[in-house]
Amino acid sequence: MNIALTSGVALGTHIPGLLLDRALSARGVPSRVYVLEKYFPDEVRQRIQIAKGRYSRDYRLAKAAHALATDHAELIPPQTLTALFEEWDAAGVGSVTVFSGFWTDVVAAYADRRPDIRVDVCHVDAVPSPSHRHAAEIPGSTHTWLLDARTNTLTETIPVTRPGARLPWKSRSDGFLAHGGGWGMGTHPAAAARLVEAGVPVSLILPEPWSDPPAGLSAYHQDPGWEPGRGTGFPRLVAGAGTVAPAFDDREHWADTFELTRRSRAVVSKPGAGTLLDSLNAATPVLFTDPLGGWELANERVWCALGFGMRLSEWLDRRDPALLQAMHERLRAAADEAASYPERIVAEGFGRGAGRGAGEGFGEGFEQGFGQGFGRRDR
């Protein structure tokens, strides 16, 4: 069995974990997804929900908090960790894919207990994200990078398993989708308002309901009944008042946000890893708003260098529909050519392929370039 270790506070790691789980299962490989926060005490999970609301309302606060991100694996009670290890033993776990670096200490402890397991750290961002930036190296682990900021390349991807996920350009609506990632953080509401004023229909996803959206805007909010720690289902949306939602018929294969992404001409969002993965799988270009931190800025630079997106302000200056279609065509070709991470895991016997060390090549140059400390800090 392969287990994917994700975090509910970063859906940019959780969604890839769910997609990997579906892809491996479709190839006959037993798979399961584990969310770190599920094993926290109730009071800690409650504090996380409070923080989520604060960050969605105050983007400056969110930026400051993410810049100071630290490892929280020590919040798992010892008895809970023991039970988790026993569960993994009983399930016959043979390999681990680490999406969130906050799992590092847990995986290192399990590897001490089970030195035969294979561990691959899958980086969904182009440089180490906050969870990986503070993570020590897991002995014997390998590292996979889906994006590479050093070369501005897309190296691998995690595709959706259902055929027909990518809709033809001519069959899409003329509207854009604006959202702030899993936690609804960013400047996308103001961006959506500006687009509506410019005559562009917009679907806007918010953390909470909007009772009276303006004309030209379809409002959605995150389903309050969905939590990443409950089961392995994808995140769901609820349509706001007056919004005619599409039929969300493929919730086993992708999130509702992806359903809206595949129907849109462009996505307006900050450059989170999950947004870029949706962009590639749907061949929908991204018009970028203000990034959360240096790792997202690195993602944006890679996506723009590949011709898959541009800054929203740049597009508004030109407003040329041909630009979007050209980006769509490049995304479609790249998705067809990109190597499949799930297929490599299967081919190599659960992902024991060659990789580079954590943070290798991302030293002082990246710190100076993006204003963040990206190098690995061993403990």
Image (cartoon, grey):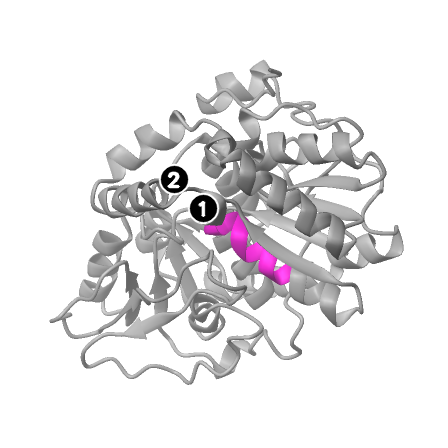
Q: Quadrant of the C terminus?
A: top right
Q: Which residue is mark 2?
A: 291
Q: Name the residue rendered at 82%, 34% in the picture.
A: 115
Of 259 and 312, nearer the camera is 259
Frontmost residue, 323 versus 288:
288
Q: Give the residue number, with chain letter if any, for mark 1.
A: 271
Q: Residue at x 69, y 30 (%)?
A: 108
Given the image, on which type of amino acid does mark 2 rest? Answer: Pro
Q: Amino acid at mark 1?
A: Pro
Disc 1 vs disc 2: Cβ atoms closer than 8 Å? yes
Q: Is residue 251 left or right of residue 206?
A: right
Q: Secondary structure at mark 1?
A: loop
Query: Which element type, helix, strand or loop, lies under badge 2?
Result: loop
Check residue 171 for magenta coloring: no
Left/right placement of residue 98 relative to residue 261 reads: right
- Counting from the top left corner in percent of width and height, residue 98 is at 65, 42
